[in-house]
Image: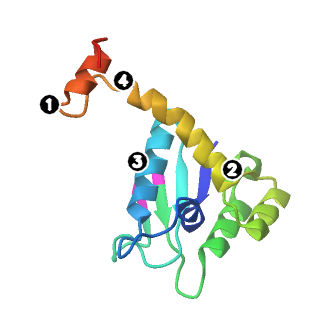
Amino acid sequence: MPYLVDGNNLLGSWGGPKGKDDRRGEVVRRVSAFCRARNVRATIVFDGHPLRPDMAAQDLGPVSVRVPHEGQDADTVIRELVERAARPAEVILVTSDKALYSYCKTLGASVLRAHEWNALERRLAPARAQGAGEKPERETDVDGWLRKFGGSE
């Protein structure tokens, strides 16, 4: 099932932007890792400017990123994506916005509130940390090598 993520809403569940960092890149990285771990696809819709000034839509492997056209907001884009879905019942919307949640649910979409998605993500994180890859990220990651090959920490 494809996920449709209200990016700003999910980010808000993590405490929102920090200073000048809008943290949208973190949302893309975490949702991408989630998608790779579950072998699913997701579209993230953000309010505001595109991540790249020349692109309002980007396809990044298992994740697509969309921003609304001028005069629209992310909720409008999300509603339109669910309305146009060939099978809305196969869409899983991630948002805690009550109005958006209710509207998309009436169209048949499944809905996860941000805290529910966060719980799913946390369940996947230990599996990735326990050696889901073939080797630690860096050659100098001694603790990672010890965990991978059963040495004591």
The amino acid pointed to by label 2 is: Val
Q: Residue at x 31, y 19 (%)?
A: 147
Q: Residue at x 65, y 63 (%)?
A: 81
Q: Which residue is mark 1?
A: 140
Determine the secondary structure under disc 3: loop
Q: CA distance from mark 3 to mark 1?
A: 29 Å
* Mark positioned earlier in the residue sequence (2 or 4): 2
Q: Is residue 123 above or below residue 10?
A: above
Q: CA distance from mark 2 to mark 1?
A: 42 Å
* Mark positioned earlier in the residue sequence (2 or 1): 2
Depth order, front residue of 17/80: 17
Q: CA distance from mark 3 to mark 2?
A: 18 Å
Bounds of the magenta segment? 58-63
Q: Which residue is mark 2?
A: 91
Q: Which residue is mark 4?
A: 131
Q: From this viewpoint, which residue is outermost toward the top?
A: 150
| Magenta segment, prevailing SS (helix, strand or loop) | strand
The amino acid pointed to by label 4 is: Gly
The amino acid pointed to by label 1 is: Thr
Task: Look at the image and tell me whether residue 68 can be seen.
Answer: yes
Image quarter (top left, top right, bottom left or bottom right) of the N terminus: top right
Q: From this viewpoint, which residue is outermost toward the bottom?
A: 71
Depth order, front residue of 107/97: 97
Give the numbered dot on residue 61: 3
Expressed as whole percent of the image width and height from the top left, the position of residue 6 reads 60, 63
